[in-house]
Image (cartoon, grey):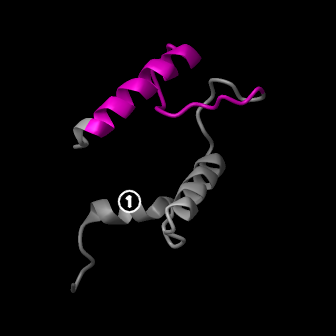
Amino acid sequence: MVPYSAPTGVLLSGYLAHRATISGARGPLFLSESRRNHGQPLSLWTWSKVIRRVALAADLPRFGRTATRAARAGPAPGS
């Protein structure tokens, strides 16, 4: 289970409705909309590029796809 805010729920609901227009199949949450890979799961490379662009737009240049995994793991040992 992943907790999220009410505004995030609205955005997620909208995305899920849009995702259903790409593919009705169960599986990965994020799917490609490109002509070449339409409906296929995003590759790790593509996901990394998306996260990088979001991080730079938010002025968080050190934020990366592993940052959320580290945050979920809890505080570092000895901290």
Looking at the rendering, in which quadrant would you find the C terminus? bottom left
Q: Quadrant of residue 33?
A: top right
Residue 6 in the magenta stretch? The answer is no
Please provide the residue range marked out in magenta.
7-35
Counting from the top left corner in percent of width and height, residue 2 is at: 25, 42
At x 63%, y 28%, the residue is 40
Closer-to-camera residue (31/58): 58
Looking at the rendering, in which quadrant would you find the N terminus? top left
Counting from the top left corner in percent of width and height, residue 66 is at: 46, 62
Counting from the top left corner in percent of width and height, residue 24 is at: 50, 13
Q: Mark 1 points at which residue?
A: 69
> On the picture, is 19 further left or further right than 46?
left
The amino acid sitting under disc 1 is: Arg
At x 49%, y 16%, the residue is 20
Counting from the top left corner in percent of width and height, residue 70 is at: 36, 66
> What secondary structure is found at the residue carrying circle 1?
helix
Q: In this view, does 54 lie above or below 15?
A: below
At x 51%, y 64%, the residue is 64
Q: In which quarter of the image is residue 61?
A: bottom right
At x 58%, y 59%, the residue is 52
Residue reaching furthest right? 36
> On the picture, is 59 further left or further right than 8?
right
